């Protein structure tokens, strides 16, 4: 027998009250830790995916939509831009690199993106097997796509028109898989990459396959990912494009910051709610401990009469607060991290974005400290009350 | 073993001043303190155990003055040297029978020895119930557990407060004999306070309040 066992026994002796406090605490900690991780990982993911992209050019519309669709491949495109206009930009002296993107088709919900090999170098994506696409209708699969569809090098498939799985298929010409990418934990993982020409060809085919020259005039891109040669580009180009062309220029860093400042309000609100839950857990524990003293004061007086000092009695009650805090904190972290795993598998299915598992963040350690303080505070008043219980009077009572 | 001189106690709310006769009980001796209800028997017992401090007078156990000790030292001394069987039997209900008997070993800071607790339970015929919850024991069994608990630390002094008040004649004799027998076996001085007239002849040494 020791003070730890006594505290645990005492917590177990009022199972209902202890469970309620523990559940509330667990829930609060889980929500906050989940929010911490989501916030941090979303920001990391977003930052990782926009590195190397200073500006995105696409059709006019919502700049955020353009960024989400062209960079992250999670929103619908704003429309198409004329190839000629886009080519003009590529020759601009402020621009170091312009990666063309043509998208709008998909296979089993995974987007088919026409681009060139500079897209792979942007994300430092390496081939796990096979080779890069060369001829039209050759594709390279992102690692998640290969995993989910089971397609391998040498297999072929028909793409669907649009972004939704099960949409009308382009059944005129199949694509052939010539390569599979290694996992990069970035956008390409969830994409099927091919040449821009493939996308043009399949749509030209679809529209009746008339003369190439006529089709050439109509050739379009969906967006271009731009890297500037110098900071001057950032100053000059976006405004120039937005004012003088039919295209739109959007700055990923700015849009992502805007998105996060919007999300931030929601996250802060959720954190406040979760923290209130933790406080309520503390309050409920305080009440359960305080009311249990009515019954337990006999036990505590008895222990004093058998040699336990006041300090030991205080320690016993305070330890209950510490134990509950620790248990709630640990369970909450488990639930939070487990929740992230679940959320990750859901969002990976829906958006092709997953979350990684990380160890304890610094925020979570601070949260642990806060929970401990709340547990101690909840136990403090009952402990003082227990300490002041007069032994003789209490033991003489029935 | 225990000596009390010129003890005087007044309750916090004022009222009557209790004055107690001097008490002396040597080791292995047995002393009965009798008195009617309201004569301050329980208060006297608590004074002797150092659970309460007198306004005047002094209590010495094994030559050490309880009144001069710090609160923590007194608690510890009591835990190691004085076993008490209270009139109201309180237990720690989250612990089983054996654990309740071992509890004083922990609270007094002594080595925890399940064998010692079990041998006491065996002498009291309760070994089979060592893993039971206290609530599942009869009144008589609970009293025997309380006696075992009071003796587990081999105290120099065993105090009992009205141990027979709720018992019939046969049980009352049985309990007082048990206390006597256990005190003798454990070599503890036994001091019983009671208003129970049935006990007036059990011990040769008596003090009436």
Image (cartoon, rainbow, N blue to C red):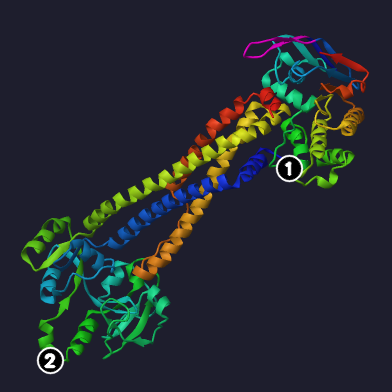
Is residue A242 toward the left or the right of residue A67 in the image?
Answer: left
Mark number, residue A211: 2
Q: Nearer the viewer, residue A196 or B163?
A: B163
- Who's the residue at 82% across and 37% down the image? B140
Q: Nearer the viewer, residue A158 or A349?
A: A349
Q: Chain of mark 1?
A: B
Q: Nearer the viewer, residue A317 or B87?
A: B87
Q: Residues within 10 Å of mark 2 (few under 14, many from 20)?
A: few
Q: Position of residue A273 (x, y in %)?
A: 38, 47
Q: Chain of mark 2?
A: A
Mark number, residue B135: 1
Extent of the magenta region: B6-20
B164 falls in the magenta region: no
Answer above or below: position of A145 versus A172: above
For the question of whether residue A181 can be seen, the reply is no
Q: Position of residue A357 (x, y in %)?
A: 45, 59
Q: Position of residue A302 (x, y in %)?
A: 70, 30
| Quadrant assignment for the C terminus of chain A | top right
């Amino acid at each position: 027998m020791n003070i730890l066992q006594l505290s645990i026994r005492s917590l177990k002796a009022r199972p209902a009250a202890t469970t309620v406090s523990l559940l509330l605490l667990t829930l609060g900690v889980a929500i906050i830790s989940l929010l911490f991780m989501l916030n941090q990982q979303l920001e990391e993911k977003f930052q990782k995916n926009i590195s190397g992209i200073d500006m995105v050019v696409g059709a006019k519309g919502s700049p955020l939509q353009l960024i989400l669709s062209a960079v992250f491949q999670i929103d619908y495109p704003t429309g198409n831009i004329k190839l000629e206009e886009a080519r003009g930009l590529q020759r601009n002296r402020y621009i170091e690199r312009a990666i063309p993107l043509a998208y709008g088709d998909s296979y089993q919900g995974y987007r088919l993106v026409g681009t060139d090999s500079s897209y792979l170098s942007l994300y430092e994506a390496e081939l796990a097997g096979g080779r890069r696409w060369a001829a039209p209708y050759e594709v390279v699969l992102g690692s998640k796509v290969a995993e989910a569809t089971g397609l391998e090098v040498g297999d072929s498939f028909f793409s669907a028109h649009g972004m939704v799985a099960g949409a009308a298929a382009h059944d005129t010409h199949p694509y052939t898989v010539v390569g599979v990418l290694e996992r990069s934990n970035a956008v390409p993982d969830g994409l099927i990459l091919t040449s821009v020409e493939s996308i043009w060809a399949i749509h030209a085919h679809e529209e009746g396959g008339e003369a190439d020259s006529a089709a050439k005039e109509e050739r379009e891109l969906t967006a271009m990912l731009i890297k500037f040669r110098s900071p001057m580009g950032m100053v000059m180009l976006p405004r120039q494009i937005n004012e003088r062309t039919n295209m739109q220029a959007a700055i990923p860093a700015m849009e992502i910051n805007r998105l996060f400042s919007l999300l931030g309000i929601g996250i802060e609100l959720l954190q406040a709610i979760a923290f209130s839950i933790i406080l309520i857990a503390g309050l409920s524990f305080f009440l359960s401990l305080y009311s249990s003293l009515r019954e337990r004061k006999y036990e505590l007086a008895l222990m004093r009469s058998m040699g336990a000092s006041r300090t030991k009695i205080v320690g016993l009650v305070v330890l209950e607060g510490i134990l509950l805090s620790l248990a709630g904190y640990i369970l909450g972290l488990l639930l939070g991290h487990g929740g992230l795993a679940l959320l990750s598998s859901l969002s990976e299915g829906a958006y092709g974005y997953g979350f990684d598992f990380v160890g304890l963040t610094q925020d979570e350690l601070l949260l642990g400290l806060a929970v401990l303080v709340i547990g101690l505070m909840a136990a403090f008043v009952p402990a003082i009350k227990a300490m002041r219980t007069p032994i003789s009077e209490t033991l003489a009572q029935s | 073993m225990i000596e009390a001189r010129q003890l005087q106690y007044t309750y916090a709310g004022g009222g009557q001043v209790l004055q107690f006769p001097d008490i002396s009980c040597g080791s292995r001796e047995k002393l009965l303190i009798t008195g009617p209800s309201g004569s301050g028997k329980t208060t006297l017992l608590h004074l002797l155990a150092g659970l309460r401090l007198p306004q005047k007078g002094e209590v010495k156990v094994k030559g050490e003055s309880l009144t001069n000790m710090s609160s923590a030292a007194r608690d510890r001394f009591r835990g190691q040297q004085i076993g008490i069987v209270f009139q109201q039997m309180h237990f720690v209900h989250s612990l089983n029978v054996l654990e309740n008997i071992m509890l004083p070993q922990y609270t007094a800071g002594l080595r925890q020895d399940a064998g010692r607790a079990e041998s006491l339970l065996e002498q009291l015929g309760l070994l089979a119930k060592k893993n039971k919850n206290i609530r599942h024991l009869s009144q008589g069994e609970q009293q025997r557990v309380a006696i075992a608990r009071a003796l587990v630390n081999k105290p120099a002094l065993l105090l009992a407060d009205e141990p027979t008040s709720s018992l019939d004649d046969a049980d009352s004799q049985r309990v007082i004999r048990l206390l006597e027998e256990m005190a003798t076996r454990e070599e503890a001085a036994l001091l019983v306070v009671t208003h129970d007239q049935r006990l007036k002849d059990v011990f040769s040494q008596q003090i009436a309040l």
